[in-house]
Each structure stands twice: as C-alpha cells, then as structure tokens.
Amino acid sequence: MPEGHTIHRLAQDYAARFSRGPVRVTSPQGKFSDAADLLTGAELTGTEAHGKHLFLRFRDSDWVHIHLGLFGKVTFGGAPAPPPTDTVRLRLADESTYVDLRGPTTCALITEAEKNAIHARLGPDPLRPDADPATACARIRRSRTTIAALLMDQKVIAGVGNVYRAEVLFRHRIDPYRPGRDLTPAEWDAIWTDLVELMHEGVRNNRIDTVRPEHTPEAMGRPPRVDDHGGEVYVYRRATLPCHICATGIRTADLAARNLFWCPTCQKR
C-alpha cells in the first residue's frame, strides 16, 4: 500500500496537470459513471491529501475521495490519450494530458461534510501544515500497544506505512515492541521531527530514502540497494542481512499482519 508521501505527491501531480480549465471525466469501468457525468466539463479547483487519502475538488465543493488501498494505481500520460481499458475506474483528461485510476479501494463523490468526517477520524499527518503532533503523543503515551503497531494506526498518525515505521524506529534506536506508554515526550518529538523531514523528502524525490549521509553506499563502499521499492534503507526488507551500523543480522517478524523489520542490537529493549 502506498505511504503518505506518495499520496501527497499525487495531489501535487494532479494539480499541476489539470490547472488550466475544464476536465473530461469518465469511468470506462462503469463503477463511477454517474459521478463522472456530473463532474465532466468542470474545473479541478483543488487537491488535498491526508495520510493515505486523496481528495480532488471540482467546482466549489464537489470532492472525489480516493484511497488506493493495496491494489490501486495511478498512471499519467500525454495527449492523445490511448483508448482506456475496462479496468480504468476514473480517467481525467484535457487537451494535453490524461490520468487513469485503476483498482482503488475507494473512489467516491462526497460532500464537504463527508470529507470533514474523514479528516476527523484520522490522526495528524506529518506532511500537513495543520498537523498537531501533541494529539498523537497523547494517544501513544496512554497506550500499552507496541509503538510499532501504533505508528501504523492511521487514527494515531496518518500516512506512516511499513517502511517509514521500521526506518524511523531504527533511526532512533527504539525497540519496536516497546509499549507506547513507555515512549518519552522527547523521543516522540524526535520521531515526529524526523518523519516530517523524511516524508517531505519522499514527496520531493518520489521514493523513500532513510539512511544518513555517512551510511550511503558511496560513503560505506557498499553496493546500492536493489529493490522494487527503491531508496536506501536501514532495515526494511533486509531480513538476515547485516545491519549497516553493527553488522548484526536484521530480524523480521509478523506484527498486526504486517512484516516488521528491526536490528536486535541497535534497537535493544
């Protein structure tokens, strides 16, 4: 599932592509046809992201809510747009560009009130200027749940996925199994500040890189990471490989139906 930086990047890309005038809106798959008929010919007047939720605004207050889920994909292209396949849930197009959405968990036309309700159930997003990290801190410090599970709970903090979760805990030498209530306010402030920086970098580069300058392949004289997720990381998907810092084998385990990665030496309890 895409992490929050991908959704914020999509919000920027939609806005950059469709800021010139009326947009043709279609649903070749048919599941969004009624809403597409209402929107076609309108202007895309704004885009927004909160965690893993993408919002496209047409006119003043018609919002398309998109959640990619596990299988959703967005494809951008230039005009002329090719004939769409019947897997395209939503296509936006104008005279110079098009974008296709396939396989999302959610693609729905919603009201302003419905959009506000979605925001209300999500935790603070490190990529949003209105985020209040104190809200997340309060939830974490009264919970016995592991910090690794809490970081993936979108009601606690929105946009953090499996990669950022594993990497930020490693960067701050925090055992992923530590209960949230044992995290100090100073540790949370450091984690939040780091997530803000890392995720903004993820938006700029459209990939996740988490290693510090002294641990890059060039600095360490090691081969670059080869993985379909791209980016240089410390522990994510590096099970059994040596830690870049201490050479201990990286461990993996199942936690809340997701693979957890950590270094047992650098992240001692």
Image: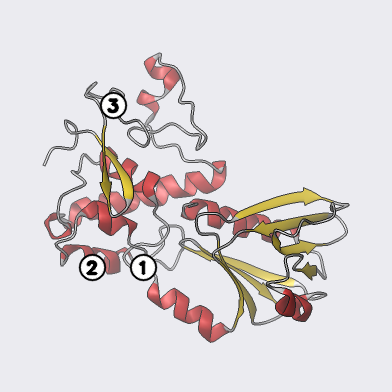
Residue 134 found in image quarter: bottom left
Q: Does residue 171 appear to the left or right of 30 in the view shown?
A: left
Residue 153 found in image quarter: bottom left
- Which three-letter amino acid code belongs to the residue tagged 1? Gly
Q: Which of 257/10 is in front?
A: 257
The spot of residue 193 in percent (x, y) is 33, 51
Would you place residue 221 above or below residue 200 in this image?
Answer: above
Mark 1 — residue? Answer: 123
Mark 2 vs mark 1: which is more N-terminal? 1
- Circles 2 and 1, Cβ within 8 Å, touching? The answer is yes
- Circles 2 and 3, Cβ within 8 Å, touching? The answer is no
Camera-nearest label, 2 or 3? 3
Mark 2 — residue? Answer: 139
- Which three-letter amino acid code belongs to the residue tagged 3? Thr
The residue that appears at 27% across and 46% down in the rendered structure is: 254
The spot of residue 88 in percent (x, y) is 71, 60
- Which three-letter amino acid code belongs to the residue tagged 2? Arg
Label 2 crowd (10 A; few <14 / some 14-19 / many >=20): some
